[in-house]
Image: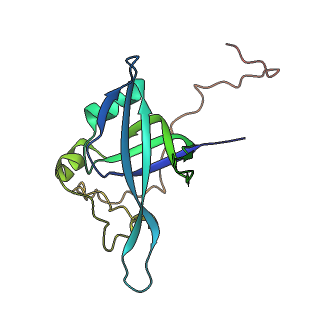
């Protein structure tokens, strides 16, 4: 059985680091993830808001280096948190428990997005994923095309053929 989740999205709020009574660090945060396709009528993209919990070193890492609006990549597993309240009503929910967390954008892109609140992009078609294309860098000056028809590879006489029975020498 496999329970593996990989998410990439933006944090909807600053993560808050907490500790259990026994001193184990935990961090809860929500990741907004754009859906692949836009609404046919309005052209707007819908987003899913996924609750994530990180523990120990991953929790400290998220708390220290991520903030609202930052792109994050989360690898983990889904855990249900179903419960029945005091009135006998059953509540259903789930969290993603983070095993590995990493940056989803460069430091320069992150500083440009810092402090911004989440809003779904209007018309992004970058790789059909809903994320905007990275800023274009200025292209290097083009070199004149070389004619490769007369390319010389040098002399192959310096090489010798090695006959082997297939064993690797190391």
Quadrant of the snapshot with the C terminus:
top right
- Asked if residue 164 lies left or right of residue 129, the reply is right
Residue 124 rendering spot, x and y as whole percentages? 34, 70
Task: Name the outermost residue toward the top.
Answer: 170
As drawn, which residue projects farthest toward the right? 165
Where residue 87 sits: x, y (%)? 52, 51
Q: Position of residue 119 (x, y in %)?
A: 28, 64
Give the left or right position of residue 18, taking residue 147 as reference. Answer: left
Give the image location of residue 149, x and y in percent: 49, 57
Residue 29 shows up from this direction:
yes
Residue found 45% across the figure and 65% down from its top:
35
Q: Residue furthest front?
A: 87
- Give me the residue at 72% from left, 22% from top: 162
Query: Residue at (35%, 60%) from the top-left corner?
Result: 145
* Residue 53 location, quadrant: top left
Quadrant occupied by the N terminus: top right
* Colour scheme in use: rainbow
User: For this rendering, which residue is in front, 60 or 73?
Assistant: 60
Identify the image quadrant of residue 140: bottom left
How many numbered dots are placed on residues in this image?
Answer: 0
Any part of residue 91 in sight:
no
Q: Nearer the viewer, residue 111 or 70?
A: 70
Nearer to me, 9 or 155: 9
**Residue at coordinates 45% horizontally, 42% vertically from top-left?**
74
């Amino acid at each position: 059985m496999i329970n593996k989740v990989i998410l990439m999205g933006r944090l909807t709020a600053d993560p808050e680091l907490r500790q259990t009574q026994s001193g184990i660090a935990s961090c809860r945060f929500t990741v907004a993830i754009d859906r692949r396709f836009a609404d046919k009528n309005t052209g707007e993209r819908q987003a899913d808001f996924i609750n994530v919990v990180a523990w120990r070193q991953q929790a400290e890492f998220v708390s220290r280096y991520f903030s609202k609006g930052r792109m994050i990549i989360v690898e983990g597993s889904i855990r249900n948190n179903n419960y029945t309240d005091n009135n006998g009503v059953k509540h259903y929910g789930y969290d993603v428990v983070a095993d590995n967390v990493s940056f989803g954008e460069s430091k320069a892109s992150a500083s440009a997005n810092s402090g911004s609140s989440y809003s779904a992009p209007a018309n992004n078609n970058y790789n059909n994923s809903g994320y905007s294309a990275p800023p274009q860098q200025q292209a290097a000056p083009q070199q004149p095309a070389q004619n490769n028809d007369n390319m010389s590879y040098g002399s192959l006489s310096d090489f010798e053929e090695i006959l082997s029975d297939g064993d690797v020498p190391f």
